[in-house]
Amino acid sequence: MPTSQRVTLLQDLTVYHALAQKQQFLDALAATTETLELDLSNVSEMDTAGLQLLILLKNEAHRAGKQTTIVAHSQVVRSVIDFCNLAAVFGDPFVIPAREAS
């Protein structure tokens, strides 16, 4: 079993995809011994269902003695997390691509 695994999400984090994504995330978490890395750089839409899914995943990882980190945030993901004042809950640094920084 690998110590870390990366999941790159290609769909939006919305209610329309949440059920399938929940299973995908939980399966990936079960398949790693330490850290699940989430690449959310392709997410162009996120609603509260998507946010709840990320919180659930973070809590499940903590319960299992593992870690979940977001290694790439899209602008939408950063905005939702920032708007809800949850950056400290996730604890992941926001990496802003140079093309968005200017």
Image: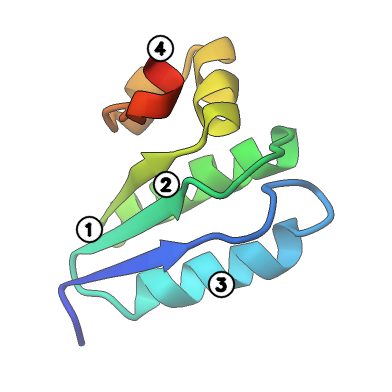
Q: On the image, numbered disc 1 is attached to which residue?
A: 65
What residue lies at 29% left-to-right and 33% top-to-bottom?
Answer: 92
Mark 1 crowd level (few <14, some 14–19, many ≥20, 10 Å Cα): few
Is 62 placed above or below 89 here? below
Q: How is the image coloured?
A: rainbow
Label 3 to label 2, Cα distance in Å? 16 Å
Residue 14's x, y, as percent?
75, 46
Q: On the image, numbered disc 2 is attached to which residue?
A: 59
Which mark sits nearer the N-terminus, 3 or 4?
Answer: 3
Given residues 96 and 47, the one toward you in this image is 96
CB contact under 8 Å: marks 2 and 4: no
Mark in front: 2 vs 4 = 4
* Dot 3 amino acid type: Gln
Mark in front: 3 vs 2 = 3
* Dot 4 amino acid type: Ser
Given residues 51 and 98, the one toward you in this image is 98
Mark in front: 1 vs 4 = 4
Is 76 placed above or below 45 here? above
What residue lies at 81% left-to-right and 49% top-to-bottom?
Answer: 15
Q: On the image, numbered disc 3 is attached to which residue?
A: 24
Mark in front: 3 vs 4 = 4
What residue lies at 42% left-to-right and 74% top-to-bottom?
Answer: 28
* Dot 1 amino acid type: Gly
Residue 102's label in the rendered image is: 4
The secondary element bearing badge 1 is classed as loop
Which mark sits nearer the N-terminus, 3 or 1?
Answer: 3
